[in-house]
Image (cartoon, rainbow, N blue to C red):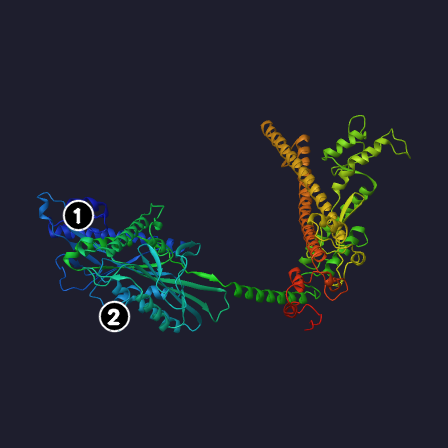
Amino acid sequence: MTTTITSHHFLSTCSVLGSVLDLEGGFKQDKRHHPVLQAACYLIWELKLSQMMRSKNSNKHYFTKMGSRKKVHAFVRVRPTDDFAHEMIKYRDDNKTIDIHLKKDSRRGVVNNQQTDWSFKLDRVLHDASQDLVYETVAKDVVSQALNGFNGTIMCYGQTGAGKTYTMTGATESYKHRGILPRALQQVFKMIEERPTHAITVRVSYLEIYNESLFDLLSTLPYVGPSVTPMTIVENPQGVFIKGLSVHLTSQEEDAFSLLFEGETNRIIASHTMNKNSSRSHCIFTIYVEARSRTLSDEKYVTSKINLVDLAGSERLGKSRSEGRVLKEATYINKSLSFLEQAIIALGDQKRDHIPFRQCKLTHALKDSLGGNCNMVLVTNIYGEAAQLEETLSSLRFASRMKLVTTEPTVNEKYDAERMVRNLEKELALLKQELAIHDSLANRTLVNYDPMDEIQIAEINSQVRRYLEGTLEEIDIINLRQIQEVFNQFRVVLSQQEQEVESTLRRKYTLIDKNDYAAISAVQKAGLVDADGHLVGEPDGQGFGLGVAPFSTKPGKKSKSKKMFKEQLSSSARKEGASSPLSGKDLDVSTSKTQLTPSSKDGDVKDMVVRDRETSNTEPLASDSPKEELRPPRPSTPPAKPVAFEDFKNERGSEINRIFKENKSILNERRKRASETTQRINAIKREIDMTKEALNLQKSLREKQGEYENKGLMIIDEEEFLLILKLKDLKKQYRTEYQDLRDLRAEIQYCQHLVDQCRHRLLTEFDIWYNESFFVPEDLQMAVKPGGSIRPGMMPLSKIVSLVSGTGWGWGWWTSTGQCPLPPPQA
């Protein structure tokens, strides 16, 4: 009789047989049933797995198209031991499945539902495997793909003393016992020698995470030194990196090994009952690879990194009997490994949105490796002894959960900006040559594709003006740049004509802005309105009215109302004038004619800064000579400084004081104009807000009443149209006033700078004049007079006074400074 068992009967059959899937990822067996039934259940399980694989392979094309996602590879390495538990740990013939069997605890009584059997299927079980076989199986493909631009991570996980460090770094006693890390370095440099067409650079770093603190194991090198600021984990669009971690360039294999040995000597290890050389920290050795083509001029290049992670082993404190510092380290180790397992569980759950990477430094630093852009490989180290079976079971559960995690490795391509610019320049030159060939074939030999110079732009402007005047029938089209420049010159000519029309109107009439309520009020007070209360004259369509004389005014006479009107509009006319910005950044305020001269013509205020440089610094002031000759007798006591300052401003410092007062008055005038402009801007802003509210109200009324369309165009009423025009004019006026305010602020800043310079110069000259007039001895007056050998202000007062005190003339000071041409005193 033939019995067919399909996947539909899988759960029910297994339930009858007492075999169900274990939530931990393994397969539970029940020894109470017949072995034939157990074998049948295994057969059903294999049928179910094959069906799942067929379903998965049917969707493989989709994953390849969208970005190939792949499972994490998980391997198990069993530590060799003489006391291997053959009855409890068994391997299948496929060399991928490991079965765990525990005896039931008889102390639990007759009714005992304790689970006794587990089955874990991984990528491979490495039992009694050499270091060569482990590297070929685990790491070789990951390292080879790294040179093609794929990131890779190899992680060793397991119980303390299970052989993680031996697997990763190996033993130093024998060369053949070297681990994954030195073999990976050797493979990288060997592949570099096999690729002479590529320029490949290799850099390395060594990070240690000890008690949730980051340390650089290569900081002891003499050219690195300890970091002042603590290292932090930083995320950016390119990934996660450690800020403050030193990265070292290695040009050959020996340099890389030297850095590896330097980092290994700085690792923290301790001893306990489970392991004499137990690693007390997590270590991440990273190899950074950057490959550029030497034969191709392509700007693209690939980068990658290989993370080789040696995790600290989990400990059961009852077995390790750790105390003191070792106990604290074990607490941090178990805590970080627990957070790592939580992150792995979250990554394996397709419904989870949040992955807790930031719970500890280990998961945060490995964020790119766990479920990201990386080829991930896990090596789980376990014991084969019966005493460590519970820890072995926990490690295998972690490995089975890791197999549920998927990663999405992609090639890390970057672009060299300098090479890209060079390639673009070459391509541009080739395109120009190709255009020249096409132009020559089409008999267009005078075409120039370079940017236009000033002469060519001026010629196009002349052609546009002649075209508008009618003297030129048409403008010849040469290329796209010329077409764009023709349109630009049309805009320039139109703007110039508008300015000429407005300037002509301003010379003949007084232009009043309709939105300038102050000017309108002045017109109404002057009586220049008609019987209906509107401005006399037709509007020109641009927001201005042309003011004309009222009918009651007789020709040839100036009416009183017209005089009042001009007086009240004088301020408005000045506001409309354009003020030129102040020029000159490095003007010096001297005692010559440097000042701000305000002038007014046709309502426009123009600011001018006249600057005369002194031809010689030693030339005396013209007003000093007569006052020096007619100087009154010196008083016995110097006058008070405030009194002397008033005398100085009227005599020697009169020119500087005059310049200071004029500049200060101009500064105050600019500030007043800025204040008035600010008030006008605020008034315009309030008017804009009111107009917007009225326009929104009109729109809402139109939407309620129904919208009318004519040939696809929206029809609005006259009131809404006028509001739109008013809002447009207000915005234009607001921009103009705001630009004027910015110009005024720049002028105020410059005027303030001039005033400060004048004040400083005035006070400095006063101090020099006061000291030399009342403290210099009489017998030295001739030396410091204008035309003498010593210029006033050249000598400090204390030095001059010291000439007549003591036993000598102070000749040592004169000769040391080299400022006195007088002969030395006679002995």
Q: Earlier in the sequence, mark 2 or mark 1?
A: 1
Residue plotted at (58% across, 27% down): 704
Element class at badge 2: helix
The single residue placed furthest to the top in the displayed view is 531
Residue 491 in the image: state x and y as whole percent.
72, 50
Residue 432 in the image: state x and y as whole percent.
63, 65
Q: Is residue 356 left or right of residue 23?
A: right
Q: Residues within 10 Å of mark 1 (few under 14, many from 20)?
A: many
Residue type for callout 2: His
Residue type for callout 1: Ser
Q: Is residue 706 above or below residue 52?
A: above
Q: In front: 463, or 218?
A: 218
Determine which residue is flagged by label 1: 19
Residue 617 in view: no
Residue plotted at (12% across, 44% down): 112
Determine which residue is flagged by label 2: 177
Q: Is residue 265 left or right of residue 411?
A: left
Label 2 to label 1, Cα distance in Å? 43 Å
Residue 426 in the image: state x and y as whole percent.
57, 67
Q: Contact (CB < 8 A) between labels 2 and 1?
A: no
Q: Is residue 240 left or right of residue 670?
A: left
Q: Is residue 153 above or below residue 727?
A: below
